[in-house]
Image (cartoon, grey):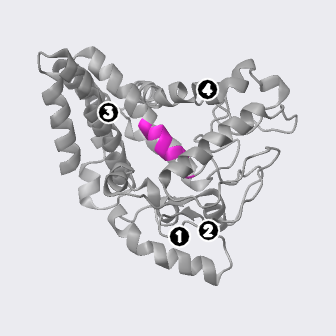
Amino acid sequence: MASWGAMLALGIKLATTADWKYKLLSVLPIAIANSYAGWLAHDYVHGTDKFCNFFRNFGAVTAGLSTTMWCDKHNMHHAKTNEVGIDEDLPGGPALFVWPPTPENDKPWRKFQHLYLPLAYSLLFVVWRIDSLKVAWSRKIRHEQFCLAAHYALALAILPAPVFAGAVLLSGFMSATIVTVSHQNEDLMFEHEHDYVKNQFEATRDCRTSNPFSEWLWGGMQYQLEHHLMPTMPRYKYPALVPLVQKFAKENNIEYRELKRENPTTTAPYTPRYSVPTTPPSPGASNELQLLKDNYMLYVDVARAPADPRARESASGLTI
């Protein structure tokens, strides 16, 4: 939390100067702080101790995210990871697709999705903020209404509106880039997988970050498999859990998927995705940048793929 506070303070300091160049520069630290507030809120929502209970609405105050909205969405993601038609974290249109849609649900702009991907990613927090307001007001959740109102009142009182808007968009791009890579390029579940552990191993990939800043910026998302297997475990314990998960996978003949810097000559065997001519992850992948590239290539492959009459719709019908 201290690093988040320091980053936010730096951004506010720059944003409140008279020089426009510093105001423009302030967008970056404020965006990073907003993304990191999301990671911290994620930790507190998953946590079960008194400290986490106290900070349960941290995301509403600091990032404009309703705890109820997030729980509804995120709990289903954990229970049915990468299950098409249920997991709302899988983009199924109308802007982005990670599998070819049916002809009737296809969009003419899908063939260009890899070109406008950064723009679509940047809208992540815009969509979540709108959903948060809808949930808090439609369900009359008074304490969340107060927290969200406090967030916007403080943000717009302290920050120039263009800086706030720019930070939300940049933060959305950063967070979407990080959270998507550990699931979207893995197996899609077009049928229900009754084995929860097997589901997590097949639908989740870890990423060993290449430098201390990335390790911090990813906010625990680099240990996605460990998190899905032990969702209430504090994230600082995940590095110690990794060898235990690897040992479990080896003993049970389960594929453990990761990209790690210290072993650049091997990658996990590639499993073709249902009806998508996906480009296999590149051999010799050395860090998180390769994982980001592989995820981008997924959007390229789906953009080029023909519509599939057998495809299923996304859970929400409107993601990003």
Q: Earlier in the sequence, mark 4 or mark 2?
A: 4
Which residue has dot 4 on it?
A: 115
Q: What amino acid type should be assigned to the residue bearing mark 3?
A: Ala
Which residue has dot 2 on it?
A: 266
Label disc, if present, on residue 31 of the rendered structure:
3
Specify the farthest residue to the bottom: 251
Q: What amino acid type should be assigned to the residue bearing mark 2?
A: Thr
Comparing marks 3 and 4, which lies closer to the viewer?
4
In the displayed structure, 20 sits above or below 168; it is above
- Residues at circles 4 and 1 in contact by the CB criterion of under 8 Å: no
Label disc, if present, on residue 263 of the rendered structure:
1
Q: Earlier in the sequence, mark 4 or mark 1?
A: 4
Q: Tell me where residue 170 appears, x and y as whole percent.
A: 39, 29
Q: Secondary structure at mark 3?
A: helix
Comparing marks 1 and 3, which lies closer to the viewer?
1
Q: Earlier in the sequence, mark 1 or mark 3?
A: 3
